[in-house]
């Protein structure tokens, strides 16, 4: 199963209103995104889509290019922002066989740590 997990070192957050892009044959409207980057150029981009936007049928992963993209409703983007702002370390998973498994995660943490 070709996949890669990397530690997120930096992120970029951008918000806007109905920025358009095309994924496959689907024209989407992006209201914001969080682009998470690793030390060796790996990237996982979480796109927050406008409520009126269609959702691409699949997440996207290109392991050769070290990049993956997932699409969530804009109202859920804050969950990803919360992770990159408040947790450390965090990891991103790229998976070309199962792109729906791509995600951000933390390592094991103590209960009640209260970061």
Image: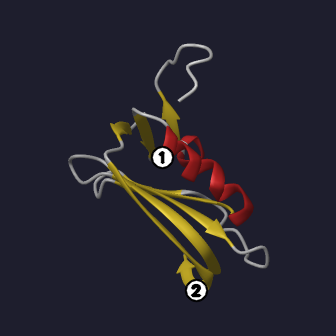
Q: Is residue 25 visible?
A: no
Residue 65 — which label?
none
Up-down relation of residue 13 to residue 10 (above or below): below
Up-down relation of residue 54 to residue 115 (above or below): below
Separation of marks 2 and 1 at Cα, in angstroms? 25 Å
Q: In front: 4, or 9?
A: 9
Query: Residue shown at 62%/17% (left/top)?
Result: 112
Tell me which corner region of the image, top left, top right, bottom left or bottom right, holds residue 55: bottom right
Left or right: residue 74 compared with residue 100:
right
Left or right: residue 23 compared with residue 94:
right
Across and down, in percent, residue 36 comes to 40, 53
Label 1: few (<14), some or many (≥20) within 10 Å?
A: many
Which quarter of the rendering shows the N terminus? Answer: top left
Query: Residue shown at 64%/80% (left/top)?
Result: 29
Label 2: few (<14), some or many (≥20) within 10 Å?
A: few
Tell me which corner region of the image, top left, top right, bottom left or bottom right, holds residue 50: bottom right
From the image, tell me which residue sits under label 2: 20
Tell me which corner region of the image, top left, top right, bottom left or bottom right, holds residue 44: bottom left
Q: In front: 6, or 99?
A: 6
Q: Are marks 2 and 1 in contact (CB under 8 Å)?
A: no
Across and down, in percent, residue 79 comes to 64, 48
- Of tags 2 and 1, the one toward the viewer is 1
* SS at badge 1: helix
* SS at badge 2: strand
From the image, tell me which residue sits under label 1: 84
Up-down relation of residue 72 to residue 23 (above or below): above
Query: Residue shown at 79%/79% (left/top)?
Result: 52
Up-down relation of residue 5 to residue 82 (above or below): above
Question: How many callouts does the rendering have?
Answer: 2
Q: Earlier in the sequence, mark 2 or mark 1?
A: 2
In this view, the residue farthest toward the left is: 40
Query: Residue shown at 51%/18% (left/top)?
Result: 109
């Amino acid at each position: 199963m070709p996949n890669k997990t990397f530690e997120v070192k930096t992120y970029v957050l951008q918000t806007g209103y109905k920025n358009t892009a095309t994924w496959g044959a689907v024209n989407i409207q992006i209201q914001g995104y969080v682009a998470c980057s690793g030390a060796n150029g790996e990237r996982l981009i979480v796109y927050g889509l406008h409520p009126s936007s269609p959702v691409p049928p699949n997440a996207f992963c290109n392991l050769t290019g070290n990049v993956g993209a997932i699409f969530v409703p804009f109202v859920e983007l804050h969950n990803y922002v919360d992770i990159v702002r408040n947790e450390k370390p965090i990891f991103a998973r790229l998976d070309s066989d199962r792109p729906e498994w791509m995600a951000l995660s933390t390592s094991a943490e103590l209960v009640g740590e209260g970061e």
